[in-house]
Amino acid sequence: MTASTACVIFDIGGVLEITPATGCVQHWEERLELPPGAVNERMGDVWQAGSLGSISEQQVHEQLAARLRLDASQVEAFMADLWTEYLGSPNEELIAYVRGLRGKCRLGILSNSFVGARERETALYGFDELVEQIVYSHETGIEKPDPRAFEAACAALGVRPESCLFIDDLAVNVRAAEAVGMQAHLIEDNAGTIARIAAHVDAGRR
């Protein structure tokens, strides 16, 4: 049997990671006696800078201390809570399936991310060993649904968009992937997603 010419590119949060909201920001607002929404109102530009890689983790910590009036231990605790929510837990079933695809098709990741994500996700989940290329927004400075994000992922893998199936948990990103010529799938459950991937990989063998 010939190897598939297909490529599958995955989002991380909501796809390879299960990431339910933990309410950590709201808990910190209550703890600090801040009105609802105050943390994101004060930190919104910092969160955006972190997702585009224009600020370091140290600078994020400094801005948290200054804007929320946190001491060093509070900053560490706040960020620990944020990372717990961000990283979630592994989608074991899907990750195991993807592991079995290695050598059968091309594999990549395209993720809207935050500075520090690569190191933490590598340590926790080994995504760098699961796929060939990981394209993070905090490293490229480009976020989905910008068409350039999808083009960057294809370029990193050396594949054409039409050979790719992109898996995401947000419809806006699925539509954006389709607009650049990819096939795309909105994940709703593992069974449907695995079936869609299998059909794509099989089609690439023909």
Image: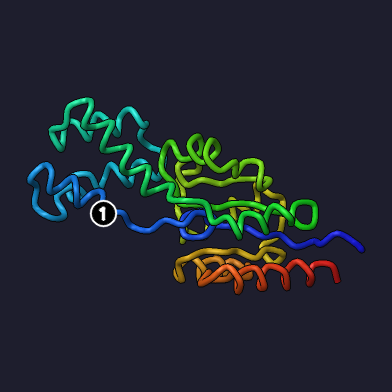
Residue at the top extreme of this rendering = 72
Q: Where is residue 30 in the image (x, y as percent from the top left)?
A: 12, 48
- Give the answer, above or below, for where 70 lies relative to 145: above
Q: Can residue 149 be seen in this view?
A: no
The C terminus, quarter of image? bottom right
Q: Can residue 185 be seen in this view?
A: yes
- Give the answer, above or below, for where 115 lies relative to 163: above
Q: Where is residue 21 in the image (x, y as percent from the top left)?
A: 33, 57
| Residue in the image at 37% along x and 44% along y | 84
- Give the answer, above or below, for where 69 lies relative to 199: above
Using a 10 Å C-alpha cutoff, classify the residue at mark 1 as few (fewer than 14 neighbours), some (14 to 19) or many (20 or more): few
Tell me if 129 is positioned left or right of 80 in this view.
right
The N terminus, quarter of image? bottom right
Q: Where is residue 38 in the image (x, y as percent from the top left)?
A: 14, 50
Three-letter residue code for mark 1: Gly
- Give the answer, above or below, for where 72 lies relative to 47: above
Q: Mark 1 points at which residue?
A: 23
Write down the quadrant of residue 96 in the picture.
Answer: bottom right
Tell me if 32 is positioned left or right of 91 in this view.
left
| Residue in the image at 81% along x and 62% along y | 4
Secondary structure at numbered mark 1: loop
Q: Position of residue 94 (x, y in %)?
A: 61, 59
Write down the quadrant of residue 52 in the picture.
Answer: top left
Write down the quadrant of residue 160 in the picture.
Answer: bottom right
